[in-house]
Image: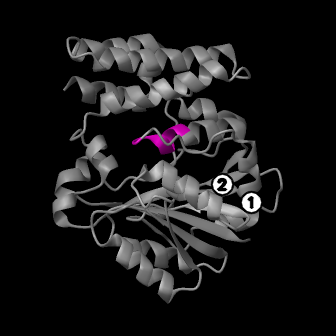
């Protein structure tokens, strides 16, 4: 295997060295491709030092040296990648020693387009743990049981009850399989572009579960994570999800191969977030959200937890 690990770098001078070195521990990693995205801190200098120190580390910036977001940075990294397989890693996260154990076996089958696993949590400070433990706890981010590829897409859309999800940090994809994707990361999405990408990826490609009962990568939680601020509601999550589901709905309307029931489900979810985000509806909007989308799913554990949480 020749794996290219793509790391978008923004405001991560204190973390990116650990991320890079965690990827370099594997002989299967052919290269680590860092894309520095006009960080406001000293991350660019740290990246330069890493590229000078390690022959497998390559550093790029956008042609205009500007800030274009994580999606555009990952796209550029994939464009530059020379490996046969693509893996992703955020600059403040890191891989564990078992990261590619399942991949080495599963990719022997040419029908396998991608493999996903589970990620754990690491708090970089006591302050971060105090602030965000209620959001992440010590739980794995994972699909809860092994699924067939055909069941992954509807499951991630919450059409299968309590299902779970996986993260980019635990995904490895055959590079040639990405040729069938008309678009990679949607660059106009500043948040949740990874979720939108994973939805489409799970529809078009055969993604198989690897290690899902133990972490293969670790999410680093600190005070400055943008996605951490969203999940903890420092940034209003409903408004960002309206943008996400508007994009998913736009894709669904144009993807003629989608079954009608899935297209309808996506439209309902999108409308529910629009309703939930309407300021004059508030809690009634959240109630309507669950009634409009999939009433039977309210009985599932995940939906019940979220339903009660939003009504508090």
77 lies above or below 136: below
Kindly indicate whether the residue at mark 1 contacts the one at mark 2 (C-beta within 8 angstroms). Answer: yes
Residue at screen point 65% across, 21% down = 254
Residue that protrudes farthest toward the front in the picture: 64
Q: Position of residue 235 (x, y in %)?
A: 24, 39
Q: Residue 28 magenta-drawn?
A: no
Q: Position of residue 111 (x, y in %)?
A: 82, 50
Residue 106 visible in the shown view:
yes
Q: CA distance from mark 2 to mark 1?
A: 8 Å
Disc on res. 267: none
| Circle 2 residue | 115
5 lies above or below 184: below
Residue at screen point 54% across, 45% down = 143
Q: In the rendered image, which quarter contains the N terminus?
A: bottom right
Residue 212 visible in the shown view:
no
Count every numbered label the image shows and give the total. Answer: 2
Residue that protrudes farthest toward the right in the picture: 110
Q: Residue 191 magenta-drawn?
A: yes
Q: Depth check: 191 or 40 in front?
A: 40
Residue at screen point 66% across, 54% down = 115
In the figure, is residue 75 to the left or right of 126?
Answer: right
The image's colouring method is one colour
| Circle 1 residue | 106
Q: Secondary structure at mark 1?
A: helix
**Other-residue count near label 2 (Cα within 10 Å), few / some / many at <14 / 14–19 / ≥20:** many
Q: In the rendered image, which quarter contains the C terminus?
A: top left
Q: Position of residue 96 (x, y in %)?
A: 50, 71
- Give the magenta range: 190-196
Q: Depth check: 138 or 228 in front?
A: 228
238 lies above or below 129: above
């Amino acid at each position: 295997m020749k794996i290219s690990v793509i790391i978008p770098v923004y405001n991560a001078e204190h973390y990116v060295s650990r991320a890079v070195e965690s990827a370099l521990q594997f002989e299967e990693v052919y290269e680590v491709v860092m894309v520095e995205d006009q960080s406001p801190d000293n991350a660019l200098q740290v990246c330069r030092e890493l590229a000078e120190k390690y022959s497998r580390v390559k550093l790029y910036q956008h042609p205009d040296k500007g800030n274009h977001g994580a999606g555009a940075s990952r796209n550029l990294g994939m464009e530059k990648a020379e490996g046969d397989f693509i893996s992703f890693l955020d600059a403040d996260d890191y891989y564990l020693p078992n990261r590619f154990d399942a991949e080495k076996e599963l990719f022997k089958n040419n029908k396998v387009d991608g493999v996903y696993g589970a990620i754990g949590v690491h708090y970089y400070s006591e302050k971060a743990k105090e602030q965000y433990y209620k959001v992440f706890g010590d739980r794995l981010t994972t699909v809860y049981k092994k699924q067939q590829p055909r069941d992954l897409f509807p499951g991630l859309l919450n059409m299968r009850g309590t299902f779970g999800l996986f993260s980019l940090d635990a995904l490895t994809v055959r590079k040639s399989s990405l040729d069938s994707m008309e678009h990679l990361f949607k660059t106009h999405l500043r948040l949740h572009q990874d979720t939108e990408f994973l939805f489409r990826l799970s529809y078009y490609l055969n993604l198989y579960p690897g290690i899902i009962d133990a972490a293969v990568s670790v999410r680093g939680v600190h005070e400055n994570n943008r996605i951490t601020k969203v999940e903890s509601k420092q940034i209003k999550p409903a408004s960002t999800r309206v943008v996400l589901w508007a994009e998913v709905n736009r894709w669904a309307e144009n993807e003629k191969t989608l079954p009608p029931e899935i297209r309808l489900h996506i439209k309902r979810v999108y409308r529910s977030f629009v309703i939930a985000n309407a300021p004059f509806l508030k809690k009634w909007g959240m109630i309507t959200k669950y009634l409009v989308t999939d009433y039977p799913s309210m009985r599932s554990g995940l939906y019940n937890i979220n339903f009660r949480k939003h009504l508090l």
